[in-house]
Image (cartoon, rainbow, N blue to C red):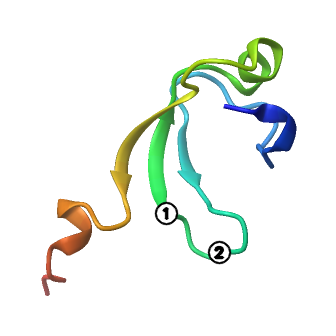
Amino acid sequence: INAEYMGMTEGLVKGSVVSLFVEGKKAPVAIGVMKMSTDEIRSTNKGNGVENVHYLGDGLWANPILD
């Protein structure tokens, strides 16, 4: 994680559900759960700050839309 270059929302706490974006894209490419607060990420600036639970192209993405 390099918090210095990320457009993180301030004040998120550990356990918050977040959407992850790629620079230049309008839609999120992943959904995750914060493993650290945004303050912890900024102060340590190392480690995994978000646990990925869903990403573009995974099995959930590939499921057809059910009516």
Q: Which dot marks residue 25?
A: 2
- Identify the residue position indicated by label 1 in the image: 29
Circle 2 sits in a helix, a strand or a loop, which is it?
A: loop
The reply to whether discs 2 and 1 touch (Cβ–Cβ < 8 Å) is: yes
Alpha-carbon distance for marks 2 and 1? 9 Å
Residue at coordinates 30% horizontally, 67% vertically from top-left?
57
Would residue 23 appear left or right of 48 to someone viewing this image?
right
Classify residue 58 by image quadrant: bottom left
Q: Residue furthest right?
A: 4
Does residue 62 lie above or below 47 as drawn? Answer: below
**Pointer 1: residues within 10 angstroms few (<14), some, or many (20+)?**
some
Q: In this rendering, is residue 54 above or below 10?
A: below
Q: Is residue 5 left or right of residue 31?
A: right
Q: Nearer the viewer, residue 23 or 39?
A: 23
Give the image location of residue 59, x and y in percent. Answer: 17, 61
Residue type at numbered disc 1: Val
Question: For the N terminus, which image quadrant?
Answer: top right
The three-letter code of the residue at mark 2 reads Lys
The residue at the far bottom in this view is: 67
Residue 63 in percent (x, y) is at 15, 73
Residue 12, located in which quarter of the rendered image? top right
- SS for tag 1? loop
> Which of the numbered marks, if any, corresponds to residue 37?
none
Q: Position of residue 61 (x, y in %)?
A: 26, 69
Residue density around tag 2, few if under 14, some if 14–19, many if 20 or more, within 10 Å: few
